[in-house]
Amino acid sequence: MRKKIVAGNWKMNKTLAEAQALTAEVLGMVADEVANNAVIILCTPFPFLLTVKNQLGTNRIAVGAQNCSEHDSGAYTGEVSAAMLKSMNIPYVILGHSERRQYFGEDGQLLAKKVDAALRHGLTPIFCCGEPLDVREKNQHIELVKKQVEEALFHLDAAAIQKIVIAYEPVWAIGTGKTATTAQAQEMHAVIRQQLAAKYGHTVAQEISILYGGSVKPDNAKELFACADVDGGLVGGASLKSRDFVEIIKGVG
């Protein structure tokens, strides 16, 4: 049975004090209100990872990083390696977010190396894929997303691919207030799962959690998460508001 996951991507937001306050709010609300078994992850900026992890303690909520280097160590000023994250017992790392692709030029070849680095150090990558608006309007979104998945992940064997979480995020829906309809989300999640099944077999494909990201909110989360192939969400802006984030978590059936 694949995991239901709700991960909050804080992006480059919050001061340390604000991060601690938000964490405390989420901790309390989850303890009091969340009855489901969803895996909950807070993907904080690098400087806050250890503080937030220590604040969470042995609670059910996990922490994750928003990126890592393809290199294990060396003269790469400003970079953070998977080995460093592992040394702090950070279990998750987001890779390939559309903002990394757009602003930092990350492509499939680089992301394959980052995926390998994360797996080498025992981290669970949350691998992001998704199309910009112009690609969807040309009806080329399926082709692009399948290419993104293939380039970054299909060098992995069946055992390794099952250690990946995939997040489908239509770029046109990230931070815009626009959200894919449930039909659009389910279509793309089914396409990805079918692609995985064709490569690795049905049983393996059924074990891989595929999250939806792109303006997930309290009022649309339950409907999105009810789709057969949607296994939770990668939440951006709404994860910065404790009430909104917890309501989204409660949307997991």
Image: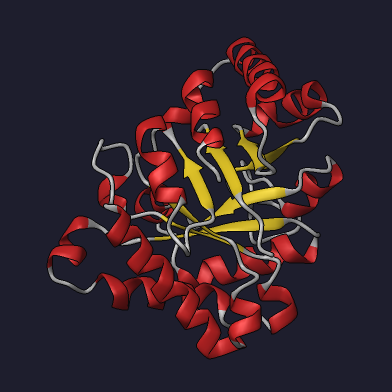
Up-down relation of residue 234 to residue 140 (above or below) = above
Name the residue rendered at 25%, 37% in the picture: 176
* Vertical relation: 44 (above or below) 106: above
Residue at the spot 53% in from the left edge and 67% down from the top edge: 110
Q: Position of residue 173 (x, y in %)?
A: 28, 46
Determine which quarter of the picture holds residue 206: bottom right
Q: Is residue 100 left or right of residue 48?
A: left
**Residue at the extreme left:** 138
How many labels sit on residues? 0
| Any part of residue 184 in sight | yes
Lateral position of residue 26 relative to residue 248, left or right: right
Q: Nearer the viewer, residue 24 or 32?
A: 32
Left or right, 226 with respect to 25, comes to left
Coordinates of residue 8 in the picture (x, y in percent): 55, 36
Is residue 92 positioned above or below 137 on the image?
above
Quadrant where the image shows the N terminus: bottom right
In percent of width and height, residue 218 lies at 41, 31
Q: Nearer the viewer, residue 43 or 248?
A: 248
Picture colour scheme:
secondary structure
How far across and how far down the image is residue 94, in percent? 58, 50
At x 61% / y 51%, what residue is drawn?
4
Q: Is residue 210 left or right of residue 236?
A: right
- Foreground pick, 97 / 247: 247
Q: Nearer the viewer, residue 53 or 103?
A: 53
Q: Residue at x 36, y 45 (%)?
A: 214
The answer to whether residue 12 of the structure is visible from this angle is no
